[in-house]
C-alpha cells in the first residue's frame, strides 16, 4: 500500500490591514509551510514561504519553494532557468492562485483566476462537473486558467474559458473548456431581462496521455484527443424571492477519432432553490459510448492510466463500453445553518443485457458554529465518491479505479495551534487493485 505522508507546519508570521480610499481594503498575510512530499518516487523536503495580498476584488497567493532531496541536497525545482521550458515551469510553480472577482457574487461581471482550480462546472454539468486541477497536489502542481465575463448587452451574454494547466498547453496537451450563454428577450421578466437561457458548451482534452507526463514509460504513447460539445436551455417556471424552480434540458455529443462515439440527453430536468436547499433531478438517455459528467473532479487521474503489470497505457475514453443507457440522476445540497452542510448525488442508468451504470457521491462538513461546542475540534468533514458502478461485477461500495474517499479533522492543541489530518484514498491498476493512501498531517500555528 503506497503511503504518502505530508507533514506541514503553517505559521501566520505577519498580517497587516490598510484601507485605501473609501472602498478598497488592502491586506497582506505571510505564512510558512514545511513538509515531506513524494517527488519522482522519493521523499523530499519542501519548504514554502506563502505571501498573500488582498486588495478589493484582487486576491493573490504565491508559493516560494525550496526542495531538499532524499540525500539532503538542495534541488533546483522551481529555480531552474537553464531552458525556456524549465524557466516557464519555475515561474508557474510560484503561483498558488491569482484571482479577480468572485463567481458567487452576482454583481461581479468579470472573473479571472490563474492557478489552482476547484469545483468547475459548465452549464448544468452534463459535460464538465466539479472539475479540479489540484487532485495530485502537493506532488504535482498545475497552474490553470478560469475566465468568465457575464451580463454583456441586453441579452445578458456570458462567456467562460477554462484551461487546466499552462504547462500542458505549452506541450500541446491541455484540457480546454468553453461556454457561451445568453438570455434572448423573448419572454422578459419585470426587469426586461429574458427568462429563457440558452447555452453552448465545448470541452476538449487535446492529449489524454499528458496525464502520464510525470511517469517513466517504456515508450511515449501517440497523441490521443477526446472532446464533447453540447447545448442546453433553461426556463424558470416558478420564481420568488427565496425560491425558484427551473425547467431545463441539455444535450451533448462525444467526439473521438478512435471510433468512440455517442450522444446524451439530460431532459427534462428540474432545478429547485428553496432557502438553504439546492436540489436537481433529470431524466437521462445516452447512446453508444457516451457517459455524463465526463470531465469530473477525478479526471486528472482518470484521463490516462498506466498498468504496470501489463506495461500498457490506456485512456479513459478507450475504457468506455459501447452500451446505450437510460435512467435518472439527482443531487441535493442542504445547509443546516449552524450545524452542518451536506450534499449527495446519485445516478442509475440501465441498458441492454442488464448492464447498469451508477454514480454515488456524498459529502458532509460540520459548521464552525457547531464545532465551537465540541472541545478541541475545529474542523470535521468527510467525502465518498464512486463512479461507473456496475453491480454485476462488483458490490455497490466495493473499491474500483473510480473510487475516491477521505476525511479531514482538525484538533486544537492550544489556543493558537491546531493539528489537521487530511487523509485521501485513490486506486490504481495492477495485478490486483492497488490502493494509494495520501496522508497530510498539518500543524498550523497563529501568532
Image (cartoon, grey):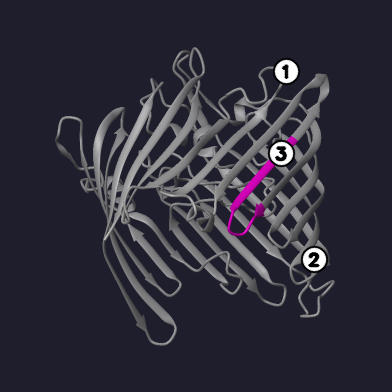
Q: Earlier in the sequence, mark 1 or mark 2?
A: 2
Q: Quadrant of residue 50?
A: bottom left
Q: Main secondary structure of the magenta part?
A: strand
Kindly identify which numbered label has been placed on residue 392. 1
Q: Using the numbered discs, state the Cα–Cα distance from disc 3 to disc 2 in whole angstroms.
A: 27 Å
Residue topped by disc 3: 346
Rendering coords of residue 401 (x, y %): 55, 26
Magenta residues (range)? 334-347
| Residue 337 part of the magenta-drawn span | yes
| Residue 385 part of the magenta-drawn span | no
Considering the image in quadrants, where does the C terminus appear? bottom left
Residue topped by disc 2: 196
Q: Nearer the viewer, residue 247 or 176?
A: 247
Mark nearer the viewer, 3 or 2? 3
Question: Taking 426 as reference, is 104 left or right?
Answer: right
Rendering coords of residue 18 (x, y %): 33, 79
Q: Using the numbered discs, state the Cα–Cα distance from disc 1 to disc 2 in whole angstroms.
A: 42 Å
Amino acid at each position: 500500500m503506497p503511503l504518502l505522508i505530508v507533514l506541514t507546519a503553517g505559521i501566520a508570521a505577519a498580517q497587516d490591514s490598510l484601507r485605501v480610499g473609501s472602498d478598497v481594503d488592502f491586506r497582506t498575510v505571510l505564512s510558512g509551510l514545511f513538509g515531506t512530499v513524494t517527488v519522482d518516487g522519493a521523499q523530499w523536503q519542501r519548504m514554502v514561504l506563502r505571501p498573500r495580498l488582498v486588495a478589493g476584488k484582487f486576491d493573490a497567493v504565491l508559493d516560494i519553494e525550496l526542495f531538499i532531496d532524499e540525500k539532503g541536497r538542495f534541488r533546483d525545482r522551481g529555480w531552474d532557468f537553464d531552458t525556456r521550458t524549465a524557466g516557464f515551469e519555475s515561474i508557474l510553480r510560484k503561483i498558488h492562485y491569482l484571482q479577480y472577482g468572485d463567481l458567487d457574487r452576482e454583481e461581479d461581471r468579470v472573473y479571472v483566476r490563474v492557478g489552482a482550480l476547484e469545483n468547475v462546472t459548465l452549464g448544468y454539468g452534463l459535460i464538465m462537473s466539479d472539475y479540479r486541477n489540484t487532485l495530485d497536489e502537493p506532488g504535482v502542481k498545475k497552474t490553470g486558467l478560469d475566465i468568465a465575463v457575464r451580463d454583456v448587452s441586453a441579452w445578458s451574454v456570458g462567456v467562460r474559458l477554462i484551461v487546466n494547466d499552462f504547462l500542458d498547453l505549452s506541450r500541446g496537451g491541455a484540457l480546454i473548456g468553453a461556454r457561451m450563454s445568453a438570455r434572448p428577450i423573448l419572454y422578459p421578466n419585470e426587469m426586461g431581462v429574458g427568462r429563457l437561457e440558452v447555452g453552448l458548451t465545448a470541452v476538449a482534452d487535446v492529449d489524454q496521455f499528458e496525464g502520464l507526463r510525470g511517469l517513466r514509460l517504456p515508450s511515449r504513447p501517440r497523441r490521443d484527443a477526446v472532446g464533447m460539445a453540447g447545448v442546453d436551455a433553461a426556463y424558470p417556471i416558478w420564481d420568488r424571492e427565496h425560491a425558484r424552480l427551473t425547467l431545463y434540458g441539455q444535450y451533448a455529443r462525444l467526439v473521438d477519432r478512435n471510433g468512440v462515439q455517442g450522444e446524451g440527453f439530460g431532459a427534462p430536468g428540474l432545478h429547485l432553490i428553496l432557502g438553504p436547499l439546492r436540489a436537481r433531478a433529470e431524466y437521462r438517455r445516452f447512446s453508444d459510448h457516451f457517459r455524463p459528467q465526463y470531465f469530473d473532479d477525478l479526471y486528472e487521474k482518470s484521463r490516462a492510466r498506466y498498468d504496470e503489470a501489463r506495461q500498457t497505457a490506456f485512456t479513459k475514453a478507450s475504457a468506455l463500453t459501447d452500451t446505450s443507457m437510460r435512467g435518472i440522476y439527482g443531487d441535493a445540497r442542504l445547509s443546516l445553518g449552524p450545524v452542518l452542510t451536506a450534499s449527495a448525488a446519485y445516478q442509475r442508468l440501465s441498458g441492454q443485457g442488464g448492464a447498469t451504470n451508477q454514480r454515488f457521491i456524498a459529502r458532509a462538513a460540520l459548521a464552525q458554529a457547531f464545532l465551537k461546542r465540541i472541545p478541541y475540534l475545529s474542523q470535521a468533514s468527510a467525502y465518498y465518491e464512486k463512479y461507473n458502478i456496475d453491480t454485476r461485477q462488483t458490490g455497490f461500495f466495493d473499491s474500483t479505479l473510480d473510487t475516491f474517499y477521505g476525511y479531514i479533522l482538525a484538533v486544537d492543541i492550544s489556543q493558537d495551534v491546531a493539528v489537521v489530518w487530511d487523509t485521501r484514498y485513490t486506486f490504481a491498476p495492477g495485478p490486483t487493485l492497488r490502493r494509494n493512501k495520501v496522508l497530510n498531517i498539518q500543524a498550523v500555528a497563529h501568532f
